Image: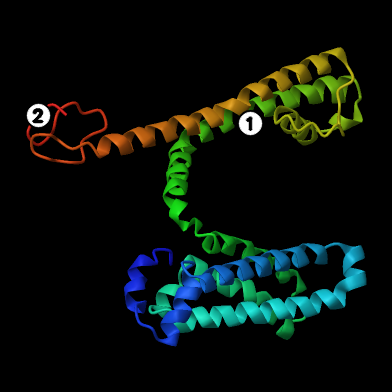
Amino acid sequence: MFNDLSQHAADHQGNGIRDRIWRIVFLSDTRAGKAFDVLLLTLIATSITVVMLETVPEIQAKHGKLFRVLEWIFTALFTAEYLLRLWVVGKKRSYLFSFYGIIDFISILPTYLTLFLPGMQYVLVVRVLRLLRVFRVMKMARHLGEANLILNAIQASVPKITVFLFLVLSITVILGTVMYVVEGIIAGNAGFNSVPQSVYWGIVTISTVGYGDVAPMTPAGKFIATLIMLIGYGIIAVPTGIVTAELNLSLTEIRLDHRRCPECGHVGHDPKASFCKMCGHDI
């Protein structure tokens, strides 16, 4: 990612116009840089609002022309900003293929596509990706380490959660089939006229969503529904507990991995080690 600005700052220590623009565009340590960030945040928020309002038929019918004009204004401004970043940056290839470089490009592409391909109006919703640019403007990249820690914990939890979800799916299919027999065949409840429909009801119920479009009528069906609801409340905590355990393990490993041996100074011990693996000293 094009996030570590410190490695590029050394290339922009001069007082030329290109270096000054770089500091304004990529940093926020000057009044001009802060004003640029505020302006960019305002443009992003306004453009996202326009994108959302365009999808409301009543508003689109009344203000469609205004939205179109505004979109071209936003596209022109974002294009100018994209070209400006491309001009002042030292490593252009790194920026072009970085996460934010790709987002910058994709956020302006849909409007131009609709100019040459009128039938592709639906791609305009891709403009909502502009919202991701807020992370850069607000300098949230510094928190990516914490985000990676959470992602690693989730990734480590995938096998356990997969087994758990398979178990839940099995329970749902079995109870859904039972409901088909009890409610659909015996009681003639139209809401349970097939096994897939009954399994769908089971998934909705066990997830505690409960649309209410299908409901059991017989005492036996209501008993099974109650059982599924109780199971549903119980299963909510399981994936959360698994991820939390993995996250705590990752945090523990990080703390332990940085222990330094007081004898030889070695760093990078096993998480559960009590002695240095290099010299045997107590750590």
* Residue 178 at x, y percent in the picture: 75, 21
What amino acid does circle 1 point to? Leu
**Of residues 164 and 20, the one drawn nearer to the viewer in this rendering:** 20
What amino acid does circle 2 point to? His
**Quadrant showing the C terminus:** top left
Report the residue marked by disc 2: 281
* Quadrant of res 40: bottom right
Whether residue 141 can be seen here: yes
- Residue 113 position (above or below residue 260): below
- Residue 117 position (above or below residue 143): below
Q: Is residue 15 left or right of residue 190?
A: left
* Residue 206 at x, y percent in the picture: 71, 27
* Quadrant of res 34: bottom right
> How was the colour assigned to the protein in this rendering?
rainbow
Instruction: Name the residue: 86% across, 26% down.
Output: 215
The residues tagged by marks 1 and 2 sit, at their Cα atoms, a distance apart of 51 Å
Report the residue marked by disc 1: 169
Give the residue furthest to the front.
Answer: 31
Disc 2 crowd rating (10 Å Cα; few below 14, some 14-19, many 20+) is few
Disc 1 crowd rating (10 Å Cα; few below 14, some 14-19, many 20+) is some
